[in-house]
């Protein structure tokens, strides 16, 4: 099949009013990726070939976003929303280039399975002119019904045009269609708009193809393939299904999720075998975790690289650019941003490390802060191998702590510290014998005087 050329057309001109959003519907995200980008990914996994994106509402925003998730896609604007066949024809220029297969997908149906697309393409390769991907549901309301006669698909009837008898059919149109490229324009151009909605229905090509003696086939896929998102409740439903699939995949690939339903992955999360993820962990985009790591409960991780056997959390926040080398530790209530934590270094408690490097085996005491921002620019803190930073220290960047440098607790370090030096950046302690007792007596009598 790989030698067959393919054009994938993704329809995304809908307004999505029920989302009640300033953002075009198909740019709302699932697992941190716009839903239309999920469709693009599925198409690519099925060997989608060239991509055509039919846009309308929010066209400029769509074009801009598409640069990121489908830089090679060609955008076609459907000026008036006259139905799904009309939308496909907005990409006429692309279709007429001549492809073996034309796939039509909806941008608001993000859970489509590449296997369903591949199966449909296979039917085209076997000689079908139109392949419809259907699904069965106990509640078919709103979907086009697949009308079969003698085991053959003869028509798709939209809900509004169905007779009472047809409404009882539970085999429905999922919205995905594969069309033989050589027939596509001829079939689409024959579609009219004499129906309850006055729209040009893509689904009409089934009857048209049948009347021309062409082979029309229905394949069956699971319900998720047809789950269209119209409002935020459905968006959450799709997110739930996506997460459930991803958790299953992670566990089967050797990752332990103690409470899988509380762990949230991003579309691109990579996580190695023998990593243990405790409950309530969030992975934002751009996370790579090697094997054998432990991610403790309530950690929030995005844009971070975590090497093998690292220990993160509980309650850790790894922000973009956090780069933990082997066996590094980032403990509770620590935030790491744009910083390398070298092998075996420990940042265990209540610390902010930003725009920095923490050398191998260094120990960062509780409450250490790299003061990286002066209100205008970010500055770098370099902490050497085996350094020790005492608790509650502020490292005012730009600053360097040499290898083996030792910082006294409570220091404010504004000048670089050479290798193996000890630095105090705080007032020297003063101890006054008997003064504590004297103070206590003075305060007690003041309190007694007030009560009287
Ligand atoms: C469509 C199918 C129906 C199927 C259902 C599955 C048709 C006529 N009906 O109905 O059989 O069961 O999907 O979810 O195809 N769009 C445009 N321009 C238009 C019209 C639509 O770009 O002029 C896009 C929409 O943005 C959407 C997709 O096409 O992504 C489907 O349109 P929608 O109005 O949701 O069709 P349904 O009524 O759900
Ligand atoms: Mg729909």
Image (tube, rainbow, N blue to C red):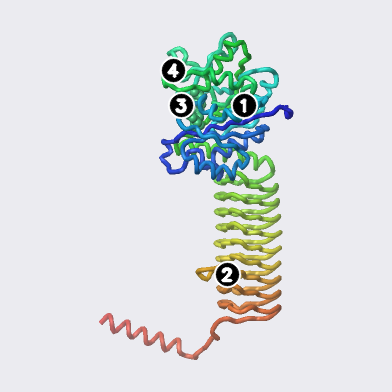
Measure the C-alpha gap from mark 3 to mark 1. Answer: 21 Å
Q: Tell me if the residue at label 4 has its CB under 8 Å from ligand 1.
A: no
Measure the C-alpha gap from mark 4 to mark 2. Answer: 67 Å
Q: Nearer the viewer, residue 294 or 97?
A: 97
- Point out which mark residue 370 bears: 2
Q: Disc 4 vs disc 2: which is toward the camera?
A: 4
Q: Tell me if the residue at label 2 has its CB under 8 Å from ligand 1.
A: no
Q: Tag 4: Cα neighbours inside 10 Å, few (<14), some, or many (≥20)?
A: few
Q: Tag 2: Cα neighbours inside 10 Å, few (<14), some, or many (≥20)?
A: many
Please give the residue where the numbered disc 1 appears in the rendered image.
Answer: 96
Q: Disc 2 vs disc 3: which is toward the camera?
A: 3
Q: Give the image location of residue 186, x and y in percent.
A: 58, 19
Mark 3: which secondary structure?
A: loop
Q: Would residue 43 be found to the left or right of residue 373 on screen?
A: right
Vertical placement of 201 versus 39: above or below? above
Q: Give the image location of residue 435, x and y in percent.
A: 45, 89
Q: Residue at x 55, y 38 (%)?
A: 36
Nearest to N terminus: mark 4 or mark 2: 4
Q: Is residue 179 visible?
A: yes
Furthest residue to the top? 150
Q: Would residue 314 be found to the left or right of residue 441 on screen?
A: right
Please give the residue where the numbered disc 3 appears in the rendered image.
Answer: 82
Nearest to N terminus: mark 2 or mark 3: 3
Q: Give the image location of residue 184, x and y in percent.
A: 60, 22
Q: Tell me if the residue at label 3 has its CB under 8 Å from ligand 1.
A: yes
Q: Give the image location of residue 48, x and y in percent.
A: 65, 32
Measure the C-alpha gap from mark 4 to mark 3. Answer: 12 Å
Nearest to N terminus: mark 4 or mark 3: 3
Q: Residue at x 65, y 50 (%)?
A: 276
Q: Tag 3: Cα neighbours inside 10 Å, few (<14), some, or many (≥20)?
A: some
Q: Where the C terminus falls, by quadrant? A: bottom left
């Amino acid at each position: 099949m790989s030698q067959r050329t393919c054009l994938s057309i993704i329809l995304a001109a809908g307004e999505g009013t029920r989302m009640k959003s300033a953002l075009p519907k198909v740019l709302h995200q699932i697992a941190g990726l716009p839903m239309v980008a999920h469709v693009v990914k599925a198409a690519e996994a099925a060997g989608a070939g060239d991509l055509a994106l039919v846009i309308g509402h929010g066209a400029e925003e769509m074009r801009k976003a598409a640069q990121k998730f489908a830089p090679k896609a060609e955008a076609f604007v459907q000026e008036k929303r006259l139905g799904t066949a009309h939308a496909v024809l907005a990409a006429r220029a692309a279709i007429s280039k001549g492809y073996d297969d034309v796939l039509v997908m909806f941008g608001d149906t993000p859970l489509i399975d590449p296997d369903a697309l591949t199966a449909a393409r296979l039917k085209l390769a076997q000689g079908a002119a139109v392949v419809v991907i259907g699904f069965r549901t106990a509640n078919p309301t709103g979907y086009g019904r697949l009308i079969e006669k003698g085991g053959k698909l003869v028509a798709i009837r939209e809900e509004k045009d169905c007779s009472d008898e047809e409404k009882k059919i539970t085999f429905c149109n999922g919205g995905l269609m594969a069309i033989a490229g050589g027939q596509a324009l001829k079939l689409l151009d024959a579609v009219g708009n004499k129906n309850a909605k006055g729209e040009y229905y893509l689904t009409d090509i089934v009857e048209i193809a049948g009347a021309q003696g062409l082979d029309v086939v229905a394949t069956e896929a699971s319900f998720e393939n047809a789950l269209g998102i119209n409002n935020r409740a459905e968006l959450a439903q799709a997110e739930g299904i996506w997460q459930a699939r991803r958790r299953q995949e992670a566990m089967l690939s050797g990752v332990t999720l103690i409470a899988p339903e509380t762990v949230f992955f991003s579309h691109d999360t990579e996580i190695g075998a023998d990593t243990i993820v405790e409950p309530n962990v969030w992975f934002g985009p751009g996370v790579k975790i090697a094997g054998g790591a432990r991610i403790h409960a309530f950690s929030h991780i995005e844009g971070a690289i975590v090497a093998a056997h690292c220990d993160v959390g509980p309650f850790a926040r790894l922000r973009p650019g956090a780069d933990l080398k082997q066996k590094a530790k980032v403990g509770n209530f620590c935030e790491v941003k744009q910083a390398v934590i070298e092998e075996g270094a420990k940042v265990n408690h209540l610390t902010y490390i930003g725009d920095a490097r923490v050398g191998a085996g260094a120990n960062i005491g509780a409450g250490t802060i790299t003061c990286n921002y002066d209100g205008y620019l970010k500055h770098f803190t370099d902490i050497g191998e085996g350094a020790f930073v005492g608790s509650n220290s502020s490292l005012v960047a730009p600053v360097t702590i040499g290898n083996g440098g030792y910082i006294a607790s409570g220091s404010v370090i504004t000048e670089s510290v050479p290798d193996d030096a000890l630095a105090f950046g705080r007032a020297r302690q003063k101890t006054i014998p008997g003064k504590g007792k004297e103070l206590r007596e003075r305060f007690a009598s003041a309190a007694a005087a007030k009560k009287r």
